[in-house]
Image (cartoon, grey):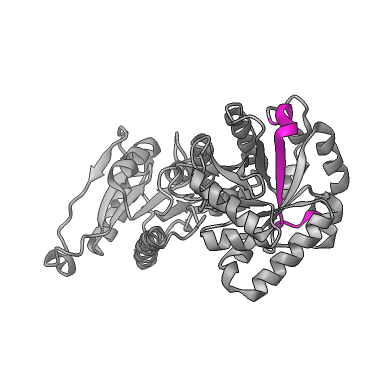
Amino acid sequence: MRLALQVAAARRPHEEDFLLFHSPREPAAYATDETCPRPSVLVVDDDVFVGRAMQHVLAAAGYDVTVTTDGTLAIDAAARHGFDTVISDIQMPGLSGLALLEAIRSRDLDVPVILLTGAPTLETAIEAVSLGAMRYLTKPVNNADLVNVVHRACTLHNIAKVRRDAAKLLGANSVEAGGRAGLQSALDRALRTLRMAFQPLVDGQASAVFGYESLMRSSEPSLPDPGAVLAAAEQLGRLTDLGQKVRLLSAAAFEQAPPETLLFVNLHTFDLLDDDLYDAAAPLSRIARRVVLEITERAALDQVPNVVSCIRRLRALGFRIAIDDLGAGYAGLSSFVALEPEFVKLDMSLVRDVHTSAIRQRLIGSLASLCNDLGMRVVAEGIETAEERDAVVGLGCKLLQGYFFAKPGPPFPAVARERLWRMELSTRVVA
């Protein structure tokens, strides 16, 4: 039997858009097991007879099926009920199946969406995949095939929910946000809720706060940390949007910073391709003489043409340059030649437990000595204990940063005086 019923136009009544919440007789497999709720499916098709046929087939297979003939009502139903799978026709008056998919993805990153069409085209198939459709099926659909696809969809939905629960428990980073449309919506929400936290950098010789690093934070739960936000922007080609928002918020907050302190702002390598970065009227440019631009080692500079010219333009505005994450990425001699940084930040993986590791001590000591000889000030990141602090100061690192002094927080976290005092004492002992 085929689902696409051959019904003459004269037999199709003119009906208003409606929802059918159907509660069919429970199959034996579900009737006695209250711990196993029936999977729920939303069917959206402007042909009422096709919708009812799918409802009958899926209900007989053990699914709780809701039918609507209108995409707008389907969005409301999906928001209220949280279905395990959505099946929608593509060609519908008003809101199309593709538009429905995009709208659902903006609210639910995991629910599988199956699109049906009686007039398949390459363009709609490509768009369906790019928006995160699980399957793209051509009518008429065999009943057994429909049940199998829905079974797989509901199973994948359960897996996705378990994975998200596990990721939350373990603090894992994931940007699998329900396809491109879901990822776009998640990034939009992240940008709307973006704010800057600040973490102090401490001068190990002056025993005082030297500056603050600006670190992005967001309230978007599907992009739970800066790495996830950055990865989403990278995947979507929206690094420019993210970089401009970070610079704008950083500059606005730093107006209230303590005098004589510097602002450290992270740049992605691709930010060097953004004309806004070189605009003398841009908010960050107006305070450029107090700003250090951190260019991470984790992205290769060879992807930026004329990088030396870019750095020259930034210095003409008053910016200073830092190489970030030294020891964790790509940079070698070419990065130092191209950037000529005033600051070099050692990645926390080098600093961790340095007081117990002779290899780390040799590496950090050599790097600090070489950088100091070239007039580059070394920042040891990730200091978490007094022992790490004392070790890196003794190895020649002039600037320090980490939870030992202060966690990132609202503008502008203070550093406990006793930690500065003990560091000052340690510096004297080393000297």
Verify whether residue 194 appears in magenta: no
The reply, left or right, for residue 226 in relation to residue 341 is left
Residue at point 17%, 55% (across, down): 24
Q: Is residue 365 above or below residue 214?
A: below
Residue situated in front as seen by the camera: 384 or 348 = 384
Residue 238 drawn above or below residue 253: below
Of 420 and 52, the residue lying toward us: 420
Residue 59 on image: x %, y %: 24, 58
Query: Where does the image place residue 153, in percent across and percent down from the top left?
Result: 39, 62
Q: Nearer the viewer, residue 290 or 283?
A: 290
Image x and y of residue 418, in percent: 49, 47
Q: Is residue 179 left or right of residue 341?
A: left
Q: Name the quadrant containing residue 55.
A: bottom left
Q: Residue at x 26, y 52 (%)?
A: 65
428 vs 300, left or right, is: left
Q: Residue furthest left?
A: 32
Kindly tell me whether residue 126 is visible in this rendering.
no
Q: Total marks drawn?
A: 0
Q: Quadrant of the C terminus?
A: bottom right
* Residue for point 31% across, 54% down: 41
Q: Please give left or right for residue 369 compared with residue 50 in the image.
A: right
The spot of residue 216 in percent (x, y) is 55, 42
- Residue at the (67%, 63%) spot, across then down: 328
Q: Where are the magenta residues, as a range?
A: 284-301
Determine the image quadrant of residue 288: top right
Tell me the quadrant of the picture where the N terminus can be found. bottom left
Question: In the image, is residue 190 above or below residue 178?
Answer: above
The residue positioned farthest toward the top in the image shown: 281
* Residue 239 can be seen, yes or no: yes
Residue 300, magenta (yes or no): yes
Q: Which of the 4 image quarters holds residue 31?
A: bottom left
